[in-house]
């Protein structure tokens, strides 16, 4: 545990060519730098760091293309990387080779507000784009919890979503086209080489083949994104439930009433406890098994109406309610959900939150059953665990908390995570809804997809016969 795998040095010709492409300053070879590139946010890479042999920092499509051509010529593994906020080991080396850092390709190239789209480089941070769009009254809707850190290129690679996916969908719904460097080093543009249309059915949908492929089929160097108007206002209804099952019934009742919330988030009793520890003034009711946060958005009159309708529907199931359509008060109510990811670490003195088994998704009808079973699994292994997530589409995040000095806990949490993944499949769900496969969930791919996996592997072999791009990920050829 916590050991890196040493590799034989790269051919000096490769290093020399990389120096020509990137210069001395953007060619990194020191062991300190390699250790930095050995991790993402996953528990797996904390346990088993994976060092590349060299890292380069790209500033242009031309540099990326030349690097890929070199890697393909010498059959050197190449790993594209953005901000490394991923939680599945998707942006780390598994076979040594070259780490290609795209984080400094971070320019917003054009905001075409009249045509409701923007052209950006992959290293743009999600929140930075939305700050730039705000003066135009526009937004890029996908909103992962890491929006202040994650790159949009990384979001595209994993088809990320976030809190408001229940209404606005996921990243793939907002990609109109992209510039991609293929494993040969050739550069293509999907969605129409010169198109600014908001939709097209011309040709194969190559953009959506690349979205969610986690850098195994090509490297995105430019994106054309669809934008939407910002809502005028938002409203929040925060409610508590004595039982997990009542929370699930409330969600179904809201959908059946014809309401379309922009977000529906759940927090279990451990998360409620953690949030109250971090922010006592929020004073969430502690005698309940779950809290739901509903958000609606639109014109002010519409939001006021929806908030009132939500209240009437939910109060039949809930024990406590708070609701508002005033911006400052909404932000206070929304704080509880925003704090959870960090707060769960407080559940165990001296513990830390493990990012593993954190991204399963099940049918909404089986959500209460799944929540209960996760707690049973955690209790079985003696692990403190908070559960929260996007109940509106069945996506939940587990937050086990362990002490790294306790070897039994470190072993048991890995067993717990395995059972959680198996539970998701048993509940007719998936092991990942927005964080991706990487190396962490690769072993479940054949079970989830069956014969379709052979089609995926055939596509990989066709586009990348030398298997240079992000090998060892997604149960594709290693």
Image: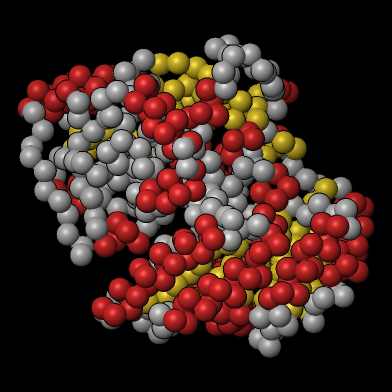
Q: Is residue 368 left or right of residue 353?
A: right
Establish if 6 lies above or below 320.
Answer: above
Q: Nearer the viewer, residue 361 or 127?
A: 361
In the image as oriented, which residue stretches furthest toward the front?
451
329 horizontally vs 272: left or right: right
Residue at figure coordinates x 47%, y 62% from the top left: 422
Based on the displayed image, in which of its 4 quarters is residue 91 positioned?
top left
Q: x, y percentage for residue 386?
A: 53, 74
Quarter containing the C terminus = top left
Res. 394 in view = yes
Above or below — where is 12 with respect to 473? above
Return the residue nearer the eye: 28 or 256. Answer: 256
- The picture places residue 120, in percent across and down from the top left corner, at 52, 29
Q: Residue at x 14, y 25 (%)?
A: 14
Residue at 89% over, 58% down: 257
- The answer, for residue 151, to whether it is visible in the render is no
Residue 154 picture location, percent across and down: 45, 40
Q: Position of residue 356 (x, y in %)?
A: 42, 62
Is residue 381 shown left or right of residue 249? Answer: left
Q: Dividing the picture into quarters, in which one does residue 73 lie?
A: top left
Which quadrant of the rendered structure holds the N terminus? Answer: bottom left
Q: Up-down: is 53 above or below 345?
A: above
Is 419 positioned to the left or the right of 468 in the image? right
């Amino acid at each position: 545990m916590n050991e890196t795998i040493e590799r034989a040095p790269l051919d000096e010709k490769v290093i020399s060519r990389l120096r020509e492409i990137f210069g001395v300053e953007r060619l990194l070879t020191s062991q300190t730098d390699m250790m930095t590139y050995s991790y993402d946010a996953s528990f797996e890479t904390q346990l088993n760091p994976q060092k590349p042999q060299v890292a380069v920092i790209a500033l242009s499509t031309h540099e990326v293309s030349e690097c890929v051509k070199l890697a393909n010529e010498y059959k050197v593994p190449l790993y594209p990387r953005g901000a490394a906020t991923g939680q599945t080991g998707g942006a780390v080396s598994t076979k040594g080779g070259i780490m290609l850092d795209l984080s400094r390709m971070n320019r917003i190239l054009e905001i075409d507000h009249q045509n409701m789209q923007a052209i950006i480089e992959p290293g743009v941070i999600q929140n930075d784009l939305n700050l730039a769009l705000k003066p135009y009254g526009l937004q890029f809707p996908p909103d992962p919890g890491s929006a202040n850190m994650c790159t949009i290129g990384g979001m595209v690679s994993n088809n990320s979503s976030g809190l408001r996916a229940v209404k606005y969908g996921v990243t793939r719904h907002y990609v109109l086209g992209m510039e991609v460097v293929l494993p040969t080093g050739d550069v293509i543009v999907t969605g129409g080489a010169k198109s600014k249309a908001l939709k097209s059915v011309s040709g194969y949908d190559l953009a959506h083949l690349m979205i969610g492929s986690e850098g195994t089929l090509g490297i995105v160097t430019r994106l054309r994104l669809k934008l939407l108007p910002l809502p005028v206002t938002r409203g929040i209804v925060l409610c508590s439930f004595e039982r997990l099952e009542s929370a699930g019934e409330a969600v179904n009742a809201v959908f059946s009433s014809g309401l379309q919330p922009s977000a529906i988030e759940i927090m279990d009793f451990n998360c409620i406890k953690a949030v109250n520890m971090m922010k006592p003034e929020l004073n969430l009711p502690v005698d309940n098994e779950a809290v739901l946060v509903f958000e609606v958005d639109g014109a002010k009159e519409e939001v006021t109406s929806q908030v009132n309708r939500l209240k009437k529907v939910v109060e039949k199931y809930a024990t406590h309610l708070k609701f508002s359509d005033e911006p400052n008060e909404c932000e206070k109510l929304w704080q509880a959900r925003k704090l959870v990811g960090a707060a769960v670490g407080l559940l165990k003195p001296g513990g830390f939150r493990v990012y593993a088994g954190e991204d399963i998704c099940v049918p909404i009808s089986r959500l209460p059953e799944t929540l209960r079973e996760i707690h049973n699994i955690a209790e079985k292994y003696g692990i403190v665990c908070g559960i929260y997530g996007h109940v509106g589409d069945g996506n939940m995040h587990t937050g086990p908390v362990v002490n790294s000095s306790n070897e039994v806990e470190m072993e048991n949490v890995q067993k717990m995570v395995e059972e959680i993944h198996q539970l998701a499949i048993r509940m007719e769900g998936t092991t990942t809804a927005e964080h991706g496969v990487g190396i962490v969930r690769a072993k479940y791919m054949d079970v989830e997809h069956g014969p379709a996996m052979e089609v995926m592997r055939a596509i990989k072999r066709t586009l990348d016969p030398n298997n240079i791009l992000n090998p060892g990920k997604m149960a594709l050829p290693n």
